[in-house]
Image: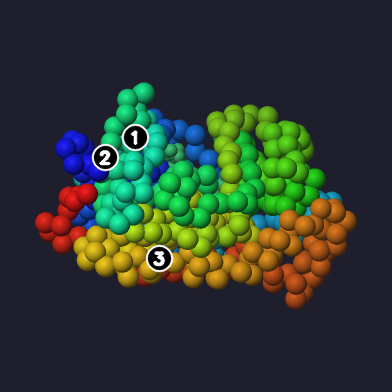
Amino acid sequence: MTEGIQVERFDVVVVGAGLAGLQATRLLARGGARVLLVERKNSVEDSVHTTGIFVRRTLEDFDLPRECLGPPVRRVKLYSPARRAQVLESGHDEFRVGRMGRLYERMLEECLDARAAWSPATRYAGLEGARDFESGGGVVVRLERAGVERRVAARFIIGGDGARSRVARDLGLDENREWIVGVEDVFRGVPPEGEPCFHCFLDPRLAPGYLAWVVCDGEETHVGVGGYAQDFDPARALEEFRAEMARRFDFTRARRVERRGGRIPVGGVLKRIVCRRGLLVGDAAGAVSPLTAGGLDPCMRLSSHAAEVVARYLSTGDEAALARYSGARFRSRFLSRLWMRRALSSVRSPALLEAACALSRRAPFDSFARHVFFGRGSFPDAAPARPSLKAGESGAAV
Ligand SMILES: Cc1cc2nc3c(=O)[nH]c(=O)nc-3n(C[C@H](O)[C@H](O)[C@H](O)COP(=O)(O)OP(=O)(O)OC[C@H]3O[C@@H](n4cnc5c(N)ncnc54)[C@H](O)[C@@H]3O)c2cc1C
């Protein structure tokens, strides 16, 4: 199919320079793979769509640069629909809000230092002759930059292209079907009212099926709402929530620096996330906690695992290496959270939620709230990532 056509060749094309794509790229490139990282945005700092709350387990297990993280947060205030607060304190630094633009930039620098090729402002447009590659392995990837088409050949493709992954569709892998949407404003100049705190508001009118939140770490304040798109108007809910929060926090000198938003897949890790031509990471793989909608820890863990699996597959050609990347196995670890999501999404009555909150303020039920916010259960641990390609094995053979 590609005979006679001049195409650039890589071991791996990674689509999407979000946290998942960046993590997979830097590990594979450090291991010696020839990687091309493709991103449709001009810069990784543009249109960040996450609050950026990293949980303790991620902070402990991954060496995130301190200057890309806000001050530690140890306190959560959980509010009922009637705004009755339950204060949860931890003896540990439970969360830090990432300065995500800076963090993505730093990770990109590490990818480039490891000699990954970088193609910003470039849209992944599809796989060429996908069917012809079923038997032979490898892919030809169609890319578009400023209206100009480019084709690259690769032995493998990684879809880190977010919740509505085109790579997933083109590879015939599973696709996300259940989402909530989140939207938030980021402020500077809100004076801290005491310790850094993560305020979570359960209110099915403002945030049906999820939360409204304010995270103040003393430097940045994020005010947001999330819920099922069909049940609310996110922009209007945010406006209403901000007006309410302006009576609770001092926004008189605050400056809004960003609006962020996007879809969050909450249907659990997809079952089919790998085939002989490629695999999915991050939101594209549905790797988000269905209950808390936290996706940053899964990005780091699943991409580390993916890098290891891909490096082994490329160096041995053994498809058994890919079988270890099983969405079904990960998914089974999320079953209780999937059930809790079903329960949360079905509660639309403020009175019922108020009663549940009253219960959760009493022992022994208060331990459940602590477990949700401070528990260390997260994405299943994958083996430590030490991907490497043997010398001379780099370079595609499509
Ligand atoms: C409002 C909001 C707040 C959140 N807050 C938190 C939080 O505080 N903590 C937490 O743990 N999780 C949070 N999440 C979830 C978390 O942010 C995501 O799970 C995580 O960022 C997903 O990263 P990713 O790299 O998989 O995808 P993305 O960050 O979506 O990256 C995908 C990249 O692929 C690019 N791309 C897509 N299509 C193409 C294409 N055709 N060609 C080229 N490039 C393409 C996109 O431009 C993008 O840069 C939040 C989500 C939202 C929406």
SS assignment at label 1: strand
Q: In the rendered image, which quarter is residue 291 located in?
A: bottom right
Up the image or down, 42 lies above or below 323; here it is above
Marks 1 and 2: in contact by CB < 8 Å?
yes
**Mark 3 crowdedness (10 Å alpha carbons): few <14, some 14-19, many ≥20:** many
* Residue shown at 49% from the left, 38% from the top: 48
What is the number of the mark on residue 152? 2
Picture coordinates of residue 266, whole percent (x, y): 61, 55
Coordinates of residue 382 in the picture (x, y in percent): 40, 68
Q: Residue furthest top?
A: 147
Distance of mark 2 from mark 3, alpha carbons? 25 Å
Question: Furthest residue to the right?
Answer: 351
Circle 3 — which element?
loop
User: x and y percent of residue 71 in the render?
Assistant: 51, 50
Q: Is mark 3 within 8 Å of ligand 1?
A: no
Q: Quadrant of residue 40?
A: top left
Q: Earlier in the sequence, mark 1 or mark 3?
A: 1
Quarter in which the N terminus is drawn:
top left
Q: Nearer the viewer, residue 114 or 361?
A: 114
Q: How was this image coloured?
A: rainbow
Q: Earlier in the sequence, mark 2 or mark 3?
A: 2
- Residue appearing at x 79%, y 70% in the figure: 362
Q: Residues within 10 Å of mark 2 (few under 14, many from 20)?
A: some
Any mark on residue 143, and which? 1
x 54%, y 66%: residue = 331
Q: Which residue is mark 3?
A: 325
Three-letter amino acid code of the residue under disc 3:
Tyr
Q: Specify whether tag 1 is near ligand 1 (CB below 8 Å).
A: yes
> For residue 88, which numbered disc appears in the image?
none
Res 160 visible? no
Cα separation, mark 2 vs mark 1, equals 8 Å
